[in-house]
Amino acid sequence: MTGLPIVNSGDPVDAFGLSSQRVPRAARPRRTEVTRNKPCCSTPTRKRSATRCAPSHKPRWDREHHFPKEAHAGLAALGAYGICVPEEDGGAGLDYLTLALVLEEVAAGDGGTSTAISVTNCPVNAILMRYGNAQQKKKWLRPLAQGQMLGAFCLTEPQAGSDASSLRTTARKDVDGWVIDGVKQFITSGKNGQVAIVIAVTDKGAGKRGMSAFIVPTDAPGYNVARLEEKLGQHSSDTAQINFDGCRIPAENLIGQEGEGYKIALGALEGGRIGIAAQSVGMARSAFEVALAYAKERQAFGGAIFEQQAVGFRLAECATQLEAARQLIWHAASLRDA
């Protein structure tokens, strides 16, 4: 599978329809730099992606709560859903530093789209990569990595937040598999996703050792979208409450061993925070670029307000904090990759 267009190859139209501002070449980590001769870095590919994911679409997406299938299809063609997944499993075979770079770019174009991609990459793909068996990787990880599916991660509950040790959702063994009952809250792609990884209690008396992880197709009987959350933004990505009402799945959908759910959940959240942080930098960068452009355009007292020292200092402070956050994320991602 070809790599991802994460660096500027001289084309002023970047992969996701954002500004042409990029990390200085000297500061780029060489081990994740994508070469110019890969098909996904060609000018036609980058322009097609820019058309699909340009920020000009965002007001309509937010206003209409629109799930941009066209944008996701374009990003899937570029491999954005399987960045860290090995090539033999359908992914790009890259690393978390690359994931951070890509998510910053996507988030600067549209935060909601980046959130859906982030969750699919980690924790969903990350869990299947580490704990999935060969059959599970073939059936679920490969289509996820290739963007044929969106993944959801069902951990948070109304009473438990993200405290994995306080979960109430249960999974009990049945004749031919497992039956899941309970409620999960604030689930990204709970409606638009095709597969969810669910953490549930399988042994109430075993505490943290009594939880397990399961693969649940979102079209499984008993998987019900109870409601969609009304959010302040990111309306291009759904956030749902999911009711599991006697949701039946086959025995083969258990991930890893019974009782490993707590370990699986915490390990996945660790890597996922790198992606969320990178998204935050991307959205902050987009806001900064809007502010900077306005300051250069707005005229007052005989010139652009950008030229006034008080305004310039505030923008400089924003740029400094933005770069500091970016470097911290790169460092964390590099440590994760080490």
Image (cartoon, rainbow, N blue to C red):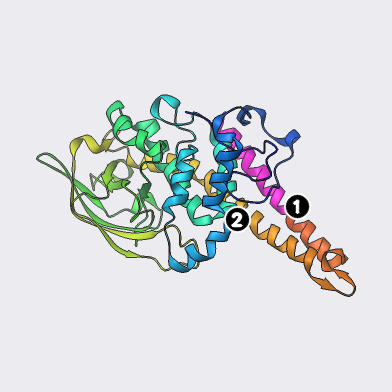
Q: Which residue is mark 1?
A: 320
Instruction: Report if residue 211 is visible in the image.
Output: no
- What residue sits 37% from the left and 48% below the top? 153
Q: Which residues are magenta?
A: 321-338
Marks 1/2 in contact by CB < 8 Å: the verdict is no
The 10 Å Cα crowd at callout 1, few under 14, some 14 to 19, many 20 or more, is few
Choose between 36 and 230: the one closer to the eye: 36
Q: CA distance from mark 1 to mark 2?
A: 15 Å
Choose between 175 and 41: the one closer to the eye: 41
Secondary element under disc 1, as helix, strand or loop, is: helix
Q: Residue furthest left?
A: 175
Residue 102's quadrant in the figure? top right
On whether residue 330 falls in the magenta region, the answer is yes
Image coordinates of residue 23 in percent, x first then y, are 70, 41
Q: Residue furthest right?
A: 302
Image coordinates of residue 334 in percent, x first then y, are 60, 34
Instruction: Say which amino acid is labelled 1.
Output: Thr
Q: In front: mark 1 or mark 2?
A: 2
Instruction: Report if residue 126 is visible in the image.
Output: yes
Secondary element under disc 2, as helix, strand or loop, is: helix
Is 70 positioned to the left or the right of 283 in the image? Answer: left
Is 202 positioned to the left or the right of 333 in the image? Answer: left
Quadrant (top left, top right, bottom left, bottom right) of the C terminus: top right
Up-down: is 283 above or below 128? below
Q: Which residue is mark 2?
A: 283
The disc at residue 41 is none
Instruction: Say which amino acid is labelled 2.
Output: Met
Q: Main secondary structure of the magenta part?
A: helix
